[in-house]
Image (cartoon, helix red, strand yellow):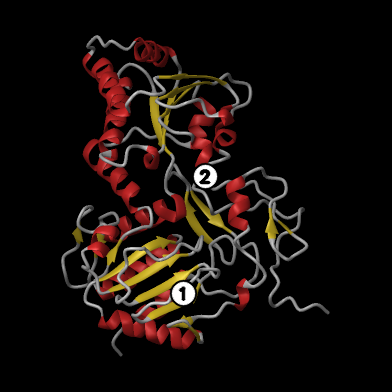
Amino acid sequence: MPDTSTTPSAPSAASKPWTCPFCPLLCDDITLAPTADHRLAAPHTACPRLDASLARFGPNDASQKPQIDGQVTDEKSALSRAAAILSNAHRPLFGGLATDVSGARALYELAAQCGAILDHLHGDTLADSNRALQDRGSFFTTLSEVRSRADLIVVFACEPSRRYPRFFERIASEGRETKFVFIGCDIDKAANAQAESILANADPFDTLALWSALVEGGRPIPTPELVALTERINAAKYTAVIYEPSALPTQHAALAIEALQRIVKAINRTARAGTLALTSDDGAASVNQAITWLSGFPLRTRVAYGLPLDHDAHRYRSETLLQRGEIDALLWVSSFAPEPLPASLDANVPAIILAHPSTAVPARHAPTVFIPVATPGIDSGGHLFRVDTSVVAPLAAARDYALPTVASIASQLAQARRPA
């Protein structure tokens, strides 16, 4: 009888569809199948991002053990050393935070015990989107609404299929003609529909300023392409404006998002339109939503029982904290992919790494604990928010490796630190 203790148990081609956790589209029509070398594959789904993600998982994952300072150890010892690091820290940072809803909830409890700052791997993009939402509000739409209602789709300054290969497939509608206009970029070849590109080489802020002057103030502008587009939007039944926050200029991206929202708000005085931001990779929306539920503030907040909550999107940016040497411990969470520790982390700052089994742990001067954890949707069930934040999708484990979840490790650390 073959030994299955270190071999993944993957769904057969006849099993029910599986939800992919590696992209915020959360495609739920995928069938997984085991390969000859005991890996996972999705042979009936054309998605290079999914293929690359599945390739990171292999039959040796179950044999990965915790480490303390580069030496293999057991989970109990690793937890004890990690709890000691957190107990001795006065200003820890919980970074990466690539996990699901239950992981975020458990990490919040631990952070509140430690007085930790919480920030995500994609914290810059999250902060820009949060700031725009706080200052301007949002006319947002959903994948379902785009698919069922939009007859005109405007894509602003991005190539959706580059990071989200199945995006156009997910919004495709049968029996209705949908037209695409790409502003400030070339046509995405994956659109496979009637499409045109305007102002492909224009500065995005110049384009937004001119467009805003037209739709908000009714002022004449020297850009006939934007005039014609606005007329098309007014004649359309429903327009979806698609943008990718991480593709916007890194300086002042929040201002670009605000401008887009301001334009769509003005359009809604006479027509119908909504925006869809392609963002929230690696559980970003899920963690941000969970932390906001629990604290009333989004990420980049310092939480501590008995003290006021402190939110500051600039001061509590991970890179800023690391470069200034303002933290004395890092808890790094990366359960979807083997993301390395931040390059700016001082080698003398203790680190706790809860990460993908194949994560390479660097040699460091300071105490370093590594605990391989389950990936939601691969080794454990879980829940993630979809890209439009309107749906929380349940995840089912694709194999039966006995790796601990982020939530279970965080809960055990919280229990170890709790006074008797």
Q: Position of residue 29 (x, y in %)?
A: 64, 46
- Residue in the image at 63% along x and 21% along y: 175
Is residue 144 shown above or below 304? above
Q: What residue would you read off at disc 1? A: 408
Extreme-bottom residue of the structure: 420
First-in-chain label (1 vs 2): 2
Is residue 235 shown above or below 23? above
Secondary structure found at label 1 = helix
Q: What residue would you read off at disc 2? A: 25
Q: Is residue 247 left or right of residue 221?
A: right
Instruction: Tell me the tag on residue 12.
Output: none
- Number of other residues with Cα within 10 Å of mark 2, as a class: few under 14, some 14 to 19, many 20 or more: many
Q: Where on the picture, by quarter, is residue 299?
A: bottom left
Report if residue 417 is visible in the image: no
Q: Position of residue 300 (x, y in %)?
A: 27, 57
394 vs 261, nearest the viewer: 261
- Residue in the image at 35% along x and 80% along y: 365
